[in-house]
Image: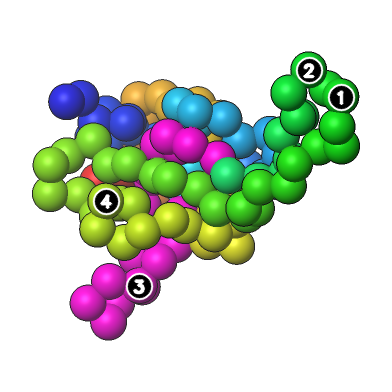
Amino acid sequence: MQPLVAKGNWVLVTSAVDPGRLHHGDIVLVRFKAAGSNVRTLRAVQEVFGGSQPAAQNTNPPIPTRSGLLYLSATSSNGLDSRQLGLFTFDQIQGKVLGSMRPISNGKEGHGVNRGLLRTD
């Protein structure tokens, strides 16, 4: 499998995430604990549980579902995701990736247009 974002690329992440607007295939910045350490990493949304689903034929009131839970996946076979850690909560989502780009070199490390972007190493 290919990585979610190419190694060394910069990603633009927004922290203004409306959980109701997350969909299958979105890439999110997630925070969780693993082996006693805090982990921040990118994962792909596979499924969103929340809100309500309309009843059959829309004849009954909407049926509430488990809310605030996400099934997230890593692209590598050894990446921690919902297969090992279970469902993630919306509180663990720190942002949604809006896009990625290769760094623009201006000869000065840490300066220029890349400031404020998250580097994926």
- Quadrant into which the N terminus falls: top left
Horizontally, residue 94 falls left or right of residue 73, namely right
Categorize mark 4 by other alpha carbons within 10 Å: few (<14), some (14-19), many (20+).
Answer: few
Q: Which residue is mark 2?
A: 57
- Magenta residues, as a range? 30-48
Numbered disc 2: secondary structure: helix
Nearer-the-camera pick, 67 or 55: 55
Q: Which residue is mark 4?
A: 83
User: Does 40 appear in magenta?
Assistant: yes
Q: Which residue is mark 3?
A: 33
The x, y position of residue 76, in whole percent, is: 17, 39
* Residue placed furthest toward the left: 78
Instruction: Give, as a three-letter code, the residue at label 2.
Output: Gln
Numbered disc 1: secondary structure: loop
Nearer-the-camera pick, 7 or 113: 7
Q: Is there a contact, CB below 8 Å, between mark 2 and mark 1?
A: yes
Here the colouring is rainbow
Instruction: Give, as a three-letter code, the residue at label 3.
Output: Lys
Residue at point 40% right, 44% down? 72
* Residue placed furthest toward the top: 57
Front position among marks 2 and 3: 2
The dot on residue 59 is: 1
Instruction: Give, as a three-letter code, the residue at label 4.
Output: Arg
Q: Earlier in the sequence, mark 2 or mark 4?
A: 2
